[in-house]
Each structure stands twice: as C-alpha cells, then as structure tokens.
Amino acid sequence: MKIETIICDIDGTLMSPGGGPFVDDKIKKVMIDLQKSGKTIVLASARIFQGVLPLALQIGMDIYGGYILSSNGTYAYDVKQKKILFCHEIKKEDALCFWEMGLKEGVDFGIAQPNYMVESGFSIGFYLDHFNCDVDVMITSDPKKYVNDIISKCSLSQEKEILDKAYNSLKEKIEENYPYNVIRSNDTFVDIVKKGCGKLEGLKELFTYVHLDFKEAAAIGDGNSDASMLQACAFSATLENGSKACKEVADIITPSYKEDGCLVFFEKIMHL
C-alpha cells in the first residue's frame, strides 16, 4: 500500500475538542517528519478557516505544501500558494432566515465570515469554538448590520439537551425547503452548509482540483462527519473516543486523543 496523502480531522483527533489552534510538540514533530518524507497533509475540519490556518502554519504546510478543507468541506485553501481553491457560499438572505428559525427553537445561531463571526449568543459550542479560531466574534440581535462578506457556513450551538430537541426540526425545515445540508458536528454544535457539501464531497472536489488519489490516501477522524472520508481512503483510523459510525468503517482504532492516539496512526503510516 502506497500512502502519499494524509487527511486529518482536528478536534477530538489531533487534540481535545476546543483545544486551541495548536497541537502539542510531539504531534507537531511527527507531522513535520511525515511531510519531510514526501507526504501531503490535508487538514479537514468543521472549523472555519481561521481556526485551521494557525495549525497549518505550525506544522510547516506553508513550506512543504498541503491543503486546508474547512467549514465541513465548503472552503479549500492551498497553504503554500496562499490561494483559495473554492468556497461554496451561503446566501445572506438564507442565513438571516435560518437565524430567525434557530432563535425560535431556542438555540444560538452563528454566521461565519472571513473577518469575524456574527452570533446571537455565546453558548457552549460557540464558546469552545472561540478558543480554536483566530477570529473576532460579534454578538448581536441585529445580524443585518454585520453580515457583509462571503458566508462559508452557518452554525447552531446550545447545550446538548436543547440542541437534541431542536436539531431534527431544523434539519427537516431547512433541507426540505432550501439547498443546504444540516450536519451535527458534535453534541453542542451543528453546521449548515451548501447541499452536496461535506467533508467527503469537499475532499473529492479538492482531490480532482489538485490531482490527489483516494487510493493513495489515509485518514483519521472521530466524528460522524468523518466516517465517509475514512471509508473512502485506502487506510483509515479512528480513536477510542470516535463515534460508532467511525469505528464501523476504520481499519484501526487507536487510543483516545487524551493519549495522543493519532501518533499510533502516524506510526502506521510511516511503515506502509
């Protein structure tokens, strides 16, 4: 098996959820060594772009090359060339409509733009996400004033029990009436992206664009949104903290992120 490309989720995989913009030094060193050996890294995350770029720079992707796939597959970026490859935008009028729908269901709503996030509140999912992203947050009851740039995704956040009650209703209303997908990223966070977008779909578009091959790719991830990309690759891993969907398709299960389980995956890649 020849592995040329390594696809990595971030939260719950390379670090704890809400663990900040950087990996620890052990993981950093191994990821740099992999690139020095000729591997290409793709960081595929539900985080917005500003939450992934610091990590990409930490591990030298601006030197060795590599790609960011952020906002659950809607935004692709060539780190070395400093170039946006694609962005599947959400219409402003749709985002503002979803904002009102979310508030009626008792959840906070967020709109992701390049320069700052616009949010209706600072509940747990947004609170954790704030530590990951080098981006300002505007809390407002009047989003029309502050939404003035491209929108890569919208998000819902609330305590798990509240989000559990709201999720199915909002997913049904949005997916049946608008060209968007509603994706549960974790217990306290939901993303809304253009229909047909997701990590696997974004990877397919990226791989076509830059001539990479799933037959020469390995992936690691822990969430439900990672399962399809794990299944598509020649070799894949999830962690002990991974979802049931990931564990059903992964080739190996490593220790949890608390034990730096990703290092077991990287060691396997070194010897494939």
Image (tube, rainbow, N blue to C red):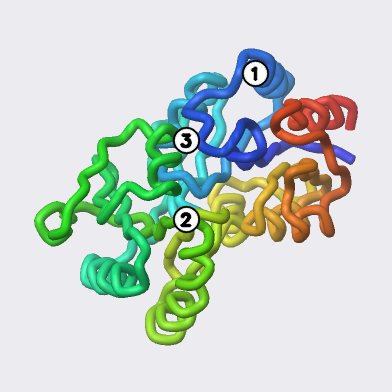
Residue 159's label in the rendered image is: 2
Q: Residue at x 76, y 35 (%)?
A: 256
Q: Which is more foreground, mark 2 or mark 1?
A: 2
Q: Quadrant of the N terminus?
A: top right
Q: Is residue 230 above or below residue 14?
A: below
Residue 32's label in the rendered image is: 1
Give neighbour class at mark 3: few <14, some 14-19, many 20+ (Cα, 10 Å). Answer: many
Question: Looking at the image, which residue sits at the far left?
Answer: 145
3 relative position to 32: left or right: right
Q: Helix or strand or loop: what does disc 2 sit on? A: loop
252 relative position to 7: left or right: right
Mark 3 sits on what residue?
A: 52
Q: Quadrant of the rendered structure where residue 145 is? A: bottom left
Instruction: Give residue 194's position: percent from left, percent from top.
Output: 43, 67
Q: Amino acid at mark 2?
A: Glu
Residue 181 visible (yes or no): no
Q: Amino acid at mark 1?
A: Ile
Sequence-wise, the earlier of marks 1 and 3 is 1
Question: Looking at the image, which residue sits at the far bottom?
Answer: 176
Instruction: Give residue 243's position: percent from left, percent from top.
Output: 73, 54
Q: Amino acid at mark 3?
A: Val
Give neighbour class at mark 1: few <14, some 14-19, many 20+ (Cα, 10 Å). Answer: some
